[in-house]
Image (cartoon, rainbow, N blue to C red):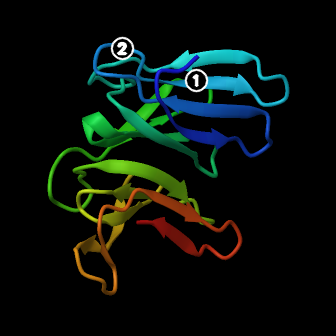
Amino acid sequence: WFERPSGIAVDADGSRIYVVDTGGVSNDQHRVRVFDAQSGKHLLDFGKRGTGPGELNLPRDVTIGLDGLLYVVDGGNFRVQVFRPDGTFVKTFGGIGRQGGQFSRPKEAAVDPAGNVYIVDSAFGNFQIFTPDGQLLLSVGSRSERDGMAKYMLPSGIAIEAEEGNIDLAV
């Protein structure tokens, strides 16, 4: 069923499960697989290896916005792609670079109670906060081998409490 599953999300009503399949260097199965949460039935796949809109290269994670849109961390393309629940491409944001709003090694995503999208970047040692439209609000942290406020060494995951909005960062 999978090459390399790496991320999972369940929609708000608990009816669908979205599983990111990272794929591999020798195949085009870089995709999101969608299943019925009750029966386990495979419903559809979207994405394939590539660099164009709706195409993925080593996708890492998926999270679901308050509006029901899917935010897929497209790691090998250094961006986030946004899809409707049926897999229809909506938009993309980010890109490779060293400036705010750009990525070096995006890994995981989460959505806060206000609908903002958080993306962890392992190489930058930070997480960036975007509006649901993809506008950068804030970048938090920097890479460091030493302990300190907002100093992270290779963060790889993020979770946000639904009620309080507290952030848990996996480092």
Q: Position of residue 75 (x, y in %)?
A: 32, 39
User: Looking at the picture, does residue 106 appear above or below residue 90?
Assistant: below
Q: Quadrant of residue 43?
A: top right
Residue under numbered circle 1? 33
Q: Is residue 143 above or below residue 44?
A: below
Q: Residue at x 23, y 53 (%)?
A: 102
> Front-most of 127 and 93?
127
Q: Amino acid at mark 1?
A: Arg
Determine the residue positioned at 74% across, 46% down.
12
Looking at the image, which residue is at 36% across and 38% down?
92
Q: Is residue 133 visible?
A: no
Which mark is on residue 142? none
At 24% from the left and 81% from the top, the residue drawn is: 146
Which of 31 and 69 lies nearest the eye of the viewer? Answer: 31
* SS under mark 2: loop
Residue 145, how many percent across, how many down? 22, 74
Check disc 2 and report the residue beneath it.
Answer: 28
Is residue 17 found left or right of 153 in the rendered image? right
Q: Is residue 30 visible?
A: yes
Residue situated furthest left in the rendering: 98
Residue 127's quadrant in the figure?
Answer: bottom left
The x, y position of residue 35, in whole percent, is 70, 24
Of the image marks 2 and 1, the number of the one nearer the N terminus: 2
